[in-house]
């Protein structure tokens, strides 16, 4: 009798439990990853507890042997004193943890809090040196001036940048290349 009663409660518990919705990636864009996730999010804080940066992605693939992470729907924001100082987005981001570089591709855009921005099909961000580079066509907007060209070298704040092969310049506002006082 006790066995039947416990079996009844067990079956009742199974029937009354609701299925949880797990976001599982059925068709992976990257093969060979150890871990794959949807709606990936990661934040970093300074020792003082202040938010340093946030990284989000629609899909994330982690390759521990290669020491890299690939993120689709890449969104990266940096913060200082609680305010976003820059936002970088791209269709695909590959973080190489060994070389400390981020390679973004597909509709890449970087925007700073003072209104400067870069658009390109690819962009490499060196985490140690805090520099940006690209070999593709780029558009840089700074202080009312738009510069189009091929190839880029810049600091992360876009305060200093070089277009390797400038193609067109549309001037408005003040000169973005003059030294700030």
Image (tube, helix red, strand yellow):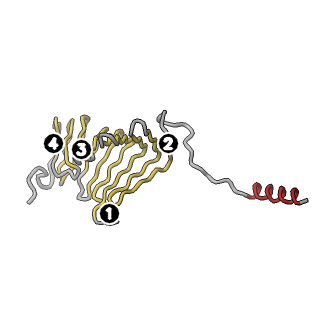
Q: Label 2 belongs to which residue?
A: 35
Q: What is the spatial separation of the Cα atoms under label 4 and label 3, in whole angstroms?
A: 10 Å
Please identify the quarter of the rendering in which residue 154 is found.
top left
Alpha-carbon distance for marks 4 and 2?
38 Å
Q: Which circle's residue, 3 or 1, is located before the other in the chain? A: 1
Which dot, 4 or 2, sits closer to the camera? 2
Q: Which of the numbered marks, if any, corresponds to residue 120?
A: none
Q: Nearer the viewer, mark 2 or mark 1?
A: 1
Residue 142 position within the rendered picture, expressed as x and y whole percent measured from the top left: 19, 51
Q: Of tags 2 and 3, which is closer to the observer?
A: 2
| In-front residue for pair 96/144 | 96
Per the image, the residue denoted by label 4 is 162
On-image quarter of the N terminus: bottom right
- Looking at marks 4 and 3 on the same chain, the residue that comes earlier in the sequence is marked by 3
Between circles 1 and 4, the one closer to the viewer is 1
> What residue is rendered at 46% in x and 47% in y?
58
Q: Give the mark toward the camera: 3 or 1.
A: 1
Residue 149 as seen in the image, left or right of residue 62: left
Residue at 35% x, 48% y is 89
Quarter where residue 147 is shown: top left
> Tag 2: Cα neighbours inside 10 Å, few (<14), some, or many (≥20)?
few
Locate the C terminus and report the quarter of the image it occupies: bottom left
Judging by the rendered image, the residue that carries numbered circle 1 is: 47
């Amino acid at each position: 009798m006790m066995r039947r009663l416990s079996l009844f409660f067990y079956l009742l518990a199974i029937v009354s439990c609701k299925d949880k919705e797990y976001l599982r990636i059925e068709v992976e864009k990257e093969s060979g990853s150890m871990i794959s996730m949807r709606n990936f999010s990661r934040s970093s804080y300074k020792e003082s507890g202040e938010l340093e940066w946030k990284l989000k992605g629609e899909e994330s693939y982690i390759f521990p042997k290669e020491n890299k992470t690939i993120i689709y729907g890449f969104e990266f924001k940096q913060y200082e004193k609680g305010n976003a100082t820059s936002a970088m987005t791209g269709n695909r981001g590959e973080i190489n943890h060994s070389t400390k570089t981020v390679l973004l591709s597909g509709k890449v855009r970087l925007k700073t809090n003072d209104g400067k921005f870069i658009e390109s099909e690819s962009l490499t961000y060196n985490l140690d040196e805090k520099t940006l580079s690209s070999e593709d066509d780029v558009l840089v907007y700074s202080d009312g001036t738009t510069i189009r060209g091929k190839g880029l070298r810049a600091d992360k704040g876009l305060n200093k940048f070089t277009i390797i092969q400038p193609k067109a310049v549309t001037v408005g506002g003040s000169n973005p290349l003059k030294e700030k006082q």
